[in-house]
Amino acid sequence: MNIFYIYTDDIIAISEKPRRTLANMNKDFLLKADSIKEPSRYLGASISKYLMDGDSHYTWAIGSKECLIESLRVVKQRIAPLNLTLKSKVTSALPSGFKPELDASNYLDDETAVLYMQLIGILRLLVELGRIDICVEVSMMSSCNCIPRVTHLYAVLHIFSYLQVYPDWKLVMDSTYNDHLPEIEKRDWSEFYPFAKKMNPPDMPEALGLEVELTMFVDASHATYLITRQSRTGVPIYVNKAPIIWFSKKQNSIETSSFGSEFMALKTGLIYKLQMMGVPVEGYCHTCVDNMSVVNNTSVPESVLKKKSNSIAYHYVRSKCAEDVLRITYENMKTNLADILTKVQVEATKKSFRNKIMFPGD
């Protein structure tokens, strides 16, 4: 199976024999003579081979070090006229206890507000390039884009200071299967959702290549936005051992319990996209949450929901369990990888989660 990612004149080929694939392309579309080689950079991401500890073969990794170094140069240049500098020693991505929604400092003037938005844009790109460890902080500060305040600017510069201290962390696209995942028991949902059956898209292409397995971690920090008491959703999704999707998002609705916010967070999936790319998906999505009420209500068919406000998310998730699209299991909050996407963590906690998701550079 050959896969091409094309953006204007940047092409990257994923294939068992990529050189031959690109050579065939070169017959009809002229490529630069020195461009048919292993990639080192694509759309701002640094691409390299990575040897896992205890492994005998290399896998691919993506990082943002080159982009980050240039970003830090630009940021320092832009803030110098404001008599501002980046701190040399920080241990967290945001100052301890900082709540941007409660800040009451002066609003930035128009010119500095534009600078603030530009800095947020750079940080969002770095998150896209794999800096999962700043995702929640960047999401929080992005919500201040329309009316940023002075202290908001200082907080954003604090994030850049953190990146300056920890510049070279990668995401490893490990294609091996996760042998440590326990099998989740399949339940009989036919009495409660007799209509539920796994439906493949009618225009789905023929699946090629090896089957992949999906793992999703889900967390929601309940009512942490202090102005409206909205919860925050955090979700990383893995294909085999490779992190493919990650996001941190303030929920649109206001939930009265952590149970409700966890249920809202569970309405996420990747299977359809993979199917439409012709990737065969093996079995169900192994879904990990740290709320036993959610686990019981999505793995025990006889369980009854007593909270009417959560009924839509409740039945949606349970119907997906009935289709065997996903099965849900408990994950201790100390090991739930989604936790890094919902809360601003102290140094030791962030380091623990970062080391589970990301890998240090050379």
Image (cartoon, helix red, strand yellow):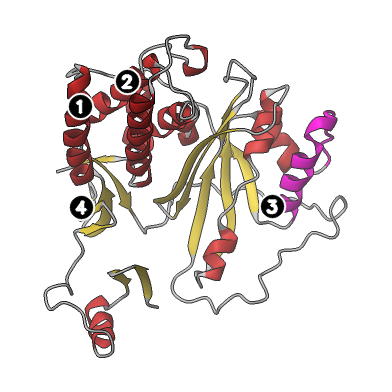
Residue that label 2 marks? 92
Label 2, secondary structure: give it: loop
Determine contact: label 1, label 2, CB under 8 Å. no
Point 72% across, 41% down: residue: 298
Residue that label 3 marks? 186
| Mark seen at residue 52 | none
Which one is nearer the viewer's eye here, 18 or 291? 18
- Give the spatial CA distance, label 1 vs label 3: 46 Å
The mark that comes first in sequence, 4 or 2, is 4
Part of the protein shown in magenta: 302-322
The mark that comes first in sequence, 1 or 4, is 4
- Give the spatial CA distance, label 4 vs label 2: 28 Å
Determine contact: label 1, label 3, CB under 8 Å. no
Q: Position of residue 302 (x, y in %)?
A: 84, 40
Q: How many marks?
A: 4
| Mark seen at residue 51 | 4
Q: Position of residue 146 (x, y in %)?
A: 49, 29
Which one is nearer the viewer's eye here, 74 or 6? 74
Q: Amino acid at mark 1?
A: Val
Position above or below: 203 against 281: below
| Mark seen at residue 165 | 1
